[in-house]
Amino acid sequence: LPAPPDPTASSIRPLAAQLRNEGRHEEALRTIGRHLRASSSSASALNAAARLCNELALSSMREGEGEGYSLDAAFEYLQVSLGMRGTTRELQAVSLNNLSIFYSRTAQPQRALRCLLQARRRSGAPRRRGPRRGAAEGSEDDIRVHVALNLTAVLADLGRHREALEMAHEAVEDLRRDAVERGEAPQASLLSAAYHNLAVQQERLGAARGHVLSYRAAIQAARRCGEDGKSMAAYLGDALEQAEETGRGSAAPRPQSAAARRRPAASVATRPASGAAILPPPRTRPATAQPVSRSRILPGPGAVVG
């Protein structure tokens, strides 16, 4: 049976979030430490604290967060989460996934790749039929998709585009297969990001028409997100238009191809659960590894919060 929710976890979240917002990250971490000591580091308390550390880390990586914005603090929150012994494998995968985002933002793709490969081992290999024994519905599989999306982005940054294409295909297939097995529509924001990543890699590797179909599928999924998906749908529409112009041979010469300039979307998560909140979109096209001071969380896949 799952452990009962820790009664004090919700009580420290507002205080920790306020301290983070004010840039008082060390005090936020001390607050979490006191909570763990008071709860005798029970399993439920450890898991709640790990989720909270991931939430604070993601908030700290958002530009526009004022004094709370700090990549260094995000790194510390994630290190604390990973240092907690006794958390679930899914939460460890979440922390490693989000640490890979930090490394991508700070132009360390090799370290990002190592984190994602570890996260992949903890979240399990892709399943081919039926739910995993003992896996909570909507939990482990969601994390695996986030990891696949980020592997696509990191492998592309490293120039390993064929491997990135394989990961993009895997993310799309997993989302669609899981939805069929559960009798529900795929999570639109994740599906849009997965098709976008697939389109970028197909275009980069010279697909004749497959990338156009993938861009269209990404746009359809983004539109299902309602208001939250408008920004991503607009970006994807522009990418599709450029791809179609290039296919007709009417695009103006550029020093770099459109496909090479586009990057896959990255995916962030704070806990293994379903339901996504879309993060603020960037003012410019998505990128996965930008200068530290100006990096930005991408549109499309959301932060799974709870």
Image: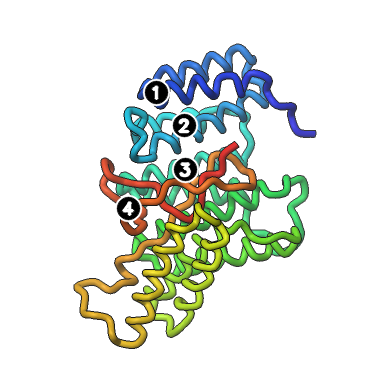
Q: Amino acid at mark 1?
A: His
Sequence order check: which comes first, mark 3 or mark 4? 3
The disc at residue 98 is 3
Report the front residue among 109 and 196: 196
- Disc 2 element: helix
Q: Are marks 2 and 1 in contact (CB under 8 Å)?
A: yes
2 or 1: tag closer to the N-terminus: 1
Q: Residue at x 74, y 27 (%)?
A: 4
Residue denoted by label 1: 25
Marker disc for residue 283: 4
Q: What's the coloring here?
A: rainbow
Residue at (46% x, 58% y) in the render:
230
Q: Residues within 10 Å of mark 4 (few under 14, many from 20)?
A: few
Position of 24 with respect to 87 (left or right) is left
**Rendered-image quadrant of the C terminus:** top right
Decide which of 263, 238 is in the foreground and name it. 238
Q: Disc 4 versus disc 2: distance between alpha carbons?
A: 23 Å
* Residue denoted by label 2: 56
Dot 4 amino acid type: Arg
Instruction: Residue 271: name its quadrant.
Output: top right
Q: Quadrant of residue 158?
A: bottom left
Is residue 118 at all visible to an observer of this figure? no
Label 3 element class: helix
Alpha-carbon distance for marks 2 and 1? 9 Å
Query: How far apart in space, not on screen, are marks 3 and 4 (Cα)?
Result: 22 Å
* Residue depicted at x 38% and y 39%: 61
Residue 184 appears anywhere in the view: yes
Q: Secondary structure at mark 1?
A: helix
Q: Nearer the viewer, mark 3 or mark 4?
A: 4
